[in-house]
Image: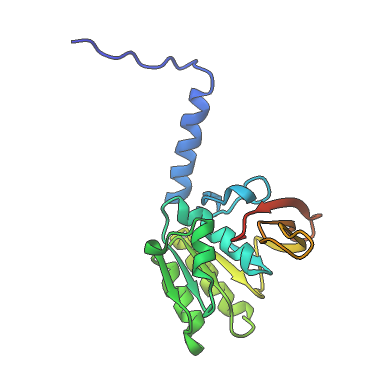
Amino acid sequence: MSVPALAPASAPGSADDVVARLRQKVAALEGGPARLTVPTHASLGGLVQLRAGAVYGVDSARLALLLMAGASAAGEWTAVVGWPDLGVEAAVELGVEPSRTVLVPDPADLWLEATAALVDVVRLVVLRPRTRVDARAASVVEARLRKRSAVLVVWGDWPRCEARLEVEESRWSGLDHGDGRLRERQMRVAVRRGAAPPRHGELQLGRAG
C-alpha cells in the first residue's frame, strides 16, 4: 500500500498558510472575532471587507442589500429588522437567499431587542432603527456581535461604526430619448473609517441594484 507523500515544509506559501489558519482559529477561541472575515459582495470586494463583530453603516437600501447579499450568497443566514417595504425581488437578484433570511418587518418598540436576539442566531443582521440609538444600548449589541461573530449593517444612525458606506453619485443607463428600460446603475461610493480619508469606488450594478 502506497502512502501519499507529505508536502515539503519548504513549499512556497505552505508554512504561511498553516500559520494563518492557526491564527484564525486562535482568534475565534480567544474572543477575537472582529479579525475574522465575512463574505462580501463581489462589487464591494475591493472597497470594503466585512469583519465579524463589527457594525457597518449605510445611507441607502442598495448598499444595505449589497452587504447582506455577499454573506447570504455564500451560505450564511441573514436577517432584516424594521424594513417593512423591503424589495424582496431586488434582494434576490443581488444574491440574497430567501430560504436563509429571517424577516422582522415591524418589531414596533422592540426593534433593538429583536436585533440583539437575531445576532445570536444569524451571521448578518440589517437594521433600520426606528429611533436614535444611545451609546449604552449600542454597547450591549456590539458586545453580543463580538461574542457571536456576527455583523450588523445599520441603514441609519449608530453611535460607532467600523465603516460607513455612502452613495455620493448615482446614474442609470438604458433609456434612449425617453424610450427603453433602465438596465444598469452606476454608483460612486465612499467608505469612511473614523478620521481617515475616505476610500472611493465605482459600482456597476444591474437593474436590481
Q: Where 169 sits versus 4, above or below?
A: below
Question: Going by the image, does 162 lie left or right of 33?
Answer: right
Residue at 52%, 63% (x, y): give it: 91
- Does residue 179 appear anywhere in the picture? yes
**Depth order, front residue of 59/10:** 59
**Depth order, front residue of 75/144:** 75
- Residue 161 position within the rendered picture, expressed as x and y whole percent measured from the top left: 65, 65
- Residue 103 position within the rendered picture, expressed as x and y whole percent measured from the top left: 44, 74
Q: Where 66 sits versus 116, above or below?
A: above
Question: Going by the image, does 174 lie left or right of 76?
Answer: right
Residue at 78%, 55% (x, y): give it: 198
Q: Where 132 sits versus 143, above or below?
A: below
- Does residue 53 appear anywhere in the picture? no
Question: Going by the image, does 38 lie left or right of 169?
Answer: left
Rendered image quadrant of residue 208: bottom right
**Depth order, front residue of 4/142:** 4
**Depth order, front residue of 61/107:** 61
Q: Locate the N terminus by quadrant.
A: top left
Marks counted in the figure total: 0
Residue reaching furthest to the right? 197
Residue reaching furthest to the top? 2
The way the protein has been coloured in the rendering is rainbow
Rendered image quadrant of residue 51: bottom right
Rendered image quadrant of residue 26: top left
- Residue 158 position within the rendered picture, expressed as x and y whole percent measured from the top left: 65, 73
Residue at 58%, 75% (x, y): give it: 138
Q: Where 45 sits versus 60, above or below?
A: above
Residue reaching furthest to the left? 1
Q: Locate the C terminus by quadrant.
A: bottom right
Question: Going by the image, does 124 lie left or right of 60?
Answer: left
- Residue 12 position within the rendered picture, expressed as x and y whole percent measured from the top left: 53, 18
